[in-house]
Amino acid sequence: MHDTADADLPLLRLQQASRRFRMGEVDVIALADVDLAIRPGELMVILGPSGSGKSTLLNLIGGLDRPTSGRVWYRDVNLTAMNDVELTAYRRDRVGFIFQFYNLVPTLTAYENVQVATELVTNSPAAPGGNGGPLDPAAALAMVELSDRADHFPAQLSGGEQQRVAIARALAKRPELLLADEPTGALDLTGARNVLGLLQRLNRRQGLTVIIITHNPAIAELAGRTVRLASGHVAEVRANDRPIEAEAIEW
């Protein structure tokens, strides 16, 4: 895998990407002929109700699954043509994942939960496209303003703090792309604002490409672009010249 010097090339691009599943005698179309380009450094929200294809789209972008037809590109690399080992390397070194449930190891401290992620990363300055290797876990926790909670176990943290540890774990890999699947689904409004504000700051200050998957239309107001899915199709792509601050979000 290698990067390109062409700054105009999308970070990710889907070309007529479809995903079908066989359930008994029924052929289920989870995603149909999606064309979408994701620019480096943008904050995008993918919006839609349950069953609209949001998670399937995330799985294709994140290299967790392959399209049944069509292609998915990471810069100038065809992810669709990768074997399992190559896709694993892409997920491990290029993509940070955040989910609704934090998936922290309960017997490890916040620091240790982040440390586990750094030990899995192989990216290095000498590697093609290397980004300097993983962050020190303490530095990753500082980025999410949890330095004073490094020695706490998940049960000693609030839901919002646990999600911030999960974000630190994702950031420790120095990913180019951060995929957040319903990251506020288990949080109250205050916790949600804190987490969304953090994602917004990471996008603005670090230039990190952030994609938020959600069913909540209020969250779309944070994004520069919103992609609305319906029944596996892209129903609308809407640009937003004036994204609101996370602190102002209401629902």
Image (tube, rainbow, N blue to C red):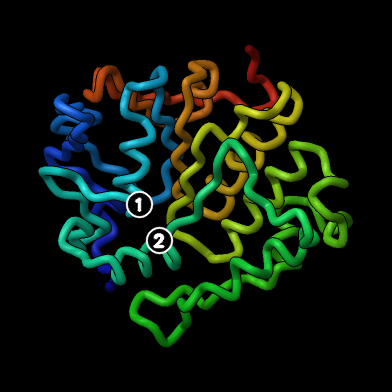
Vertical order, 130 against 167 (above or below): below
**Total marks in image:** 2
Residue type pointed to by label 1: Leu
**Residue 215 in picture, x, y percent from top left:** 47, 21
Give the quarter of the image for residue 30: top left
Classify 191 as above or below 140: above
Which quarter of the rendering shows the N terminus?
A: bottom left
- The residue located at (47%, 73%) in the rendering is 131
Q: Which residue is mark 1?
A: 64
Tell me the crowding category of disc 2: few under 14, some 14 to 19, or many 20 or more residues within 10 angstroms, Cα based. Answer: some
Q: Which residue is mark 2?
A: 91
Left or right: where 18 falls relative to 168: left
> Please, what secondary structure does the residue beneath circle 1 have?
loop
- Seen in the picture, residue 62 relative to 29 is either above or below; the reply is below
Task: Estimate the spatial distance between the alpha carbons at disc 1 and disc 2, rounded to whole Å.
Answer: 8 Å
Where is residue 2 drawn, in percent x and y? 28, 73
Seen in the image, is 133 located left or right of residue 46? right
Q: Which residue appears at 29% of the width and 46% of the height?
A: 60
Task: Answer whether labels 1 and 2 touch (C-beta < 8 Å).
Answer: yes
Residue 96 screen position, x and y as percent: 50, 55
Q: Is residue 213 left or right of residue 171?
A: left
In the rendering, at what x and y percent does residue 177 appear? 43, 53
